[in-house]
Image (cartoon, rainbow, N blue to C red):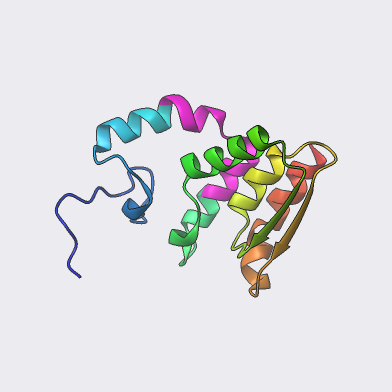
Amino acid sequence: MAPSSDIVANVHSAIDSSNKKLLKSDALYTYILDTTVFPREPECMRDLRLLTDKHPWGYMQSSTDEAQLLGMLIKMAGAKKRIEVGVFTGYSLLATALALPADGKVVAIDTDRDCYEVGRPFIEKAVLD
């Protein structure tokens, strides 16, 4: 299928993840990211996101706004346990793990240990902080 002219490329990455957002205006999406989403992104997540963007399969990573929505939903639901099937480098895993209470637990499952190892130092650092 040929790309549509109304598809908006990800304005903060060389990876086209335009299928992951609802907004069709680059300017509005950039404004929301810059004023609301990125300022709330923990440093460990930002660093992991930027590293994962360089990965050949970086398009599989959750978007920053999606990860923050998942974290908010976990807090609203009062969840204490979480399972993630398909971890990749662990960006959404980290986002949701940080949203769990101190006694929360995450079980993560993936067939590709190499991709997880990319994000592991960021996850370990977040746990120690």
**Could you tell me which quadrant the N terminus lies in?**
bottom left
Residue 51 x/y as whole percent? 54, 53
Q: Position of residue 46 (x, y in %)?
A: 56, 41
In front here: 37 or 125? 37
Q: Which residue lies furthest to the right in this view?
A: 103
Question: Quick one: 82 or 37, which is closer to the camera?
Answer: 82
Give the side of residue 96 with respect to residue 81, left or right: left
**Magenta highlight range:** 35-49
**Residue 115, placed above or below residue 93:** below
Q: Quadrant of residue 45?
A: top right
Residue 108 placement (x, y as % from top left)? 71, 61
The residue nearer to you, when weighing 27 against 6, is 6
Taking 52 as reference, is 46 above or below it?
A: above
Whole-percent x and y of residue 31? 34, 28
- Horizontal placement of 11 versus 91: left or right? left
Residue 46 shown in magenta? yes
Q: Residue furthest top?
A: 35
